Amino acid sequence: MKDQNIICPVALTLSLIEGKWKTLILRDLLEGKKRFGELQRSVEGISQKVLTTQLRALEANGIVERIAYAEIPPRVEYQLSPQGQSLHAIIDAMRIWGENYQMLDK
């Protein structure tokens, strides 16, 4: 009998990067550090509240790191943690699949 505490790895991954917002945030952070305003502009359609919530969830799960600089005015940047960087192949595979799907649709 299987241990009930073991989670399916695919389900676990999906729970950590679920939804279009987290995936798009990860896509943009693959390019490097971004400030909150940069992310809000690049993730078209996301509200400030939702972006804040999604970044906090990604940070709590160890996927995103928040860097606060002791400056006036305060400056905060977000970047992928080493664990978040390991999602690069997954995001790239999604991009390639989407490009191929678009080509089939024409």
Image: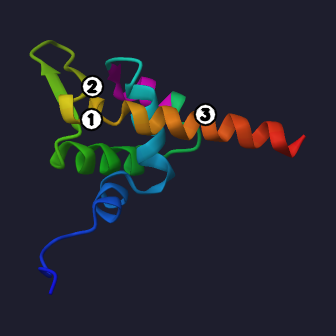
Mark 3 or 2, nearer chain start:
2
Quarter of the image containing the C terminus?
Answer: top right
Which residue occupies the foreground of this view, 16 or 89? 89
Query: Which quarter of the figure has residue 32?
Result: top left
Quarter of the image containing the N terminus?
Answer: bottom left
Mark 1 or 2, nearer chain start:
2
Image side of residue 95 versus residue 37, left or right: right
Q: Name the residue type under label 1.
A: Gly
Magenta-tinted stretch:
34-41
Q: Which residue is pictured at 16% across the width and 81% down the height?
A: 2
Is label 3 in contact with label 2 (beta carbons under 8 Å)? Answer: no
Is label 1 in contact with label 3 (beta carbons under 8 Å)? Answer: no
Q: Residue furthest top?
A: 71
* Residue position for label 2: 79
Q: Which residue is pictured at 27% across the width and 35% down the height?
A: 84
Categorize mark 3 by other alpha carbons within 10 Å: few (<14), some (14-19), many (20+).
few
- Which dot, 3 or 2, sits closer to the camera? 3
Categorize mark 1 by other alpha carbons within 10 Å: few (<14), some (14-19), many (20+).
some
- Which dot, 1 or 3, sits closer to the camera? 3
Q: Residue furthest front?
A: 1
Which residue occupies the foreground of this view, 2 or 24? 2
Rendered position, 105 above or below 75? below
Judged from the image, the secondary structure of the residue bearing numbered disc 1 is helix
* Residue position for label 3: 96
Q: Magenta stretch: residue 11 in it?
A: no
Q: Which residue is pictured at 12% across the width and 76% down the height?
A: 5
Mark seen at residue 93: none
Judged from the image, the secondary structure of the residue bearing numbered disc 3 is helix
Q: CA distance from mark 1 to mark 3?
A: 19 Å
Q: CA distance from mark 3 to mark 2?
A: 23 Å
Query: Which quarter of the figure has residue 18?
Result: bottom left
Mark 1 or 3, nearer chain start:
1
